[in-house]
Every structure is written in structure tokens, then in C-alpha cells.
Amino acid sequence: MKVEIVGVRFKKAGKIYYFSPNGSTYNSGDKIIVETARGLELGSIAIANREIDESEIIAPLKPILRPAGEDDIKNYEENKLMAKEAGQVVEKKSIEHNLEMVLMGTEYTLDRNKLIFYFTAEGRIDFRELVKDLAAIFRTRIELRQIGVRDEAKNLGGLGCCGRPLCCSTWLGDFQSVSIKMAKDQNLSLNPTKISGICGRLFCCLKYEHEVYEEMLSVMPAPGSRVKTPDGEGKVLDVFVLTEELKVQIDKNSDIIEIKRYKLKDITVLKYARKANDKIDRELEKELKVLLED
């Protein structure tokens, strides 16, 4: 069964949430008002009206309340200024309460029924007394939300090792699951400093091309396989997924070892070798596990 939806985003590179258009038509970029678990919020249409399979949504689908008016946008801008001032108060109060926390962001819901503070800290923080103080000052519901290193990097932004702005802070709506296996499949160095971003976790971009690598590796013979080439039979020494090539040692009855590269289409596999299950040094494994933590 098909369901009509629109995709709504609340931040520049935030996650996209599905809502019911409630019989109306919206275009990408339209400002709208919706009710979420946090309260009334102003969002932007990221995906215009479309039909998707019912299995792709989490029922019940909340409706869009109305298009955002001038007053809504004015309130939204005022809320941003008020949230900035509130952030300064929290920084002072956290010092008074001797709390080792770093404020990363502050925001009001559109109806100002809730004030949310995002912070980072080493370990857990007991901020119950701080919340009492803030509730007395701002006269609204207070929520302090501790975020992880990935969200911190998304919030701060910066440049990746590729020289481009961070994916997570510019366009990546949600953090996708990445693994050490992806780095191994792509024949990358397992040196933690070379496969981790500024957040200290595995590159999100390991996910982008992994399906292609998996597909190619499933049809390419593993090192150790016996193959027939235009120059005779030989043993596969290495595979190059991107160029679809194999490095092959040709069988010769001499002391000279002949090694050549061949296109996958130019060879015939005589015997497949078992896929190698490369073991990782225990100390290196401990370092790599850190890259998988939230």
C-alpha cells in the first residue's frame, strides 16, 4: 500500500523526517509548521509530495499543521536570539556549579514551551541542580542533552582530510553505520589515524562506495587463486577493484619470476582460493574498536 508523504528537515544538514501533507501540495524549500515530540517546530520541506510504500514509514504519520506565516518566521528568528542569550547564562551557571561541560548549542521550540541545551562532557554529568536554576530563570521546560563526538563535529563543522567541508555538517542528514570490514574491503591502511575523521571515529565516507567494492570482490578471484591468462597459467597475487585488474605471477620453468597485471575480462579462473580472513594484531584491534564507539 502506498502512502503520500513529505520529507521535513529542521536543520541545514539534519535528518529528514516524514510527515503527512494532509491533502496539501508542498515544494522543496517551503517553510511549514509541525508538531513533534518536542513541541511546535518550524521546518523546511526537503522532499516534496511523493508516494512511498507503507513499510518505509513509522505509523502513525503526523500531519503538517500549516504553512509557516510571517509571524512564525519572526518568532523563529527571535527564538534564535533568545537561545543565544540563554546559552551565555548556562555557561555561567555551569561554572558556578563546577560542572565540566562544554555547551555546543541552544534552541527553543517555536512555542517556547521547551528550551534545549546541547553539551559535551567526559563521562556523565549530574546537572539536576543546574536544571532547577535554569527552570527558575527561564520559566519553561528545560532539557539538557549530552551529545557524542560525531554530533560535536557535525555542530562545529570543519574540513576533512580530503580538503572539503565535513559531509556531516554540510549535507549528510544521518550517521550511517560503518565498520572496519569496509576499510579492509577497500584495501585501506588500518592505521587508526588514516581512517578516522576529526571526530576520532571511522570515516562516514567508507560507506559511500562499499556496495560497489562488495559486488566486485564477489566476482573477482581472491589472492592465491589459479587463473589462465593470455601468457599462460599463474597465481593471483593481488586484486585491484577500482581498475578491475589482477596481479598474476605466471608459471615459468626458469629462475625468472614474471609478474603481470591483467584485466578481469582477460583471464579465466581455474581454481578459486578461499577468501583470506586477515587477523588483526590485538593492540591494533583495541585501537580500532575505539573508532566504532558512539
Image: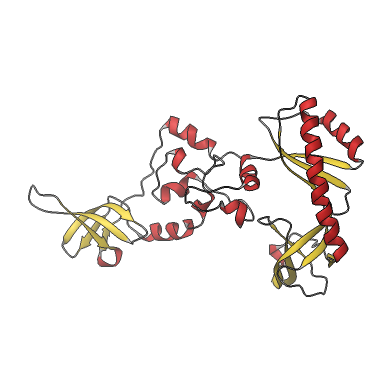
Screen quadrant of the N terminus: bottom right
Q: Is residue 97 above or below residue 140?
A: above
Image coords of residue 77 (percent x, y) = 81, 55
Q: Residue furthest left?
A: 254
* Residue 36, visible in the rendered structure: no
* Residue 246, visible in the rendered structure: yes
Screen quadrant of the C terminus: top right
State the scheme by which the image is colored: secondary structure
In the shown orientation, is residue 132 left or right of residue 187? right
Q: Is residue 10 above or below residue 121?
A: below
Q: Quadrant of residue 106?
A: top right
Image coords of residue 226 (percent x, y) = 24, 55
In the depicted view, which residue is nearer to us: 283 or 253? 283
How many numbered dots are placed on residues in this image? 0
Image coords of residue 67 (percent x, y) = 83, 68
Q: Residue, x 34% and y 59% (percent of image)?
A: 220
In the shown orientation, is residue 72 left or right of residue 103? right
In the shown orientation, is residue 182 left or right of residue 124? left
In the depicted view, which residue is nearer to us: 21 or 90? 90
Q: Residue, x 75% and y 68% (percent of image)?
A: 30
Q: Is residue 156 above or below residue 90?
A: below
Q: Is residue 80 above or below residue 93?
A: below
In the shown orientation, is residue 229 left or right of residue 25? left
Q: Quadrant of residue 241?
A: bottom left
Image coords of residue 157 (percent x, y) = 61, 48
In the depicted view, which residue is nearer to us: 270 or 280? 280
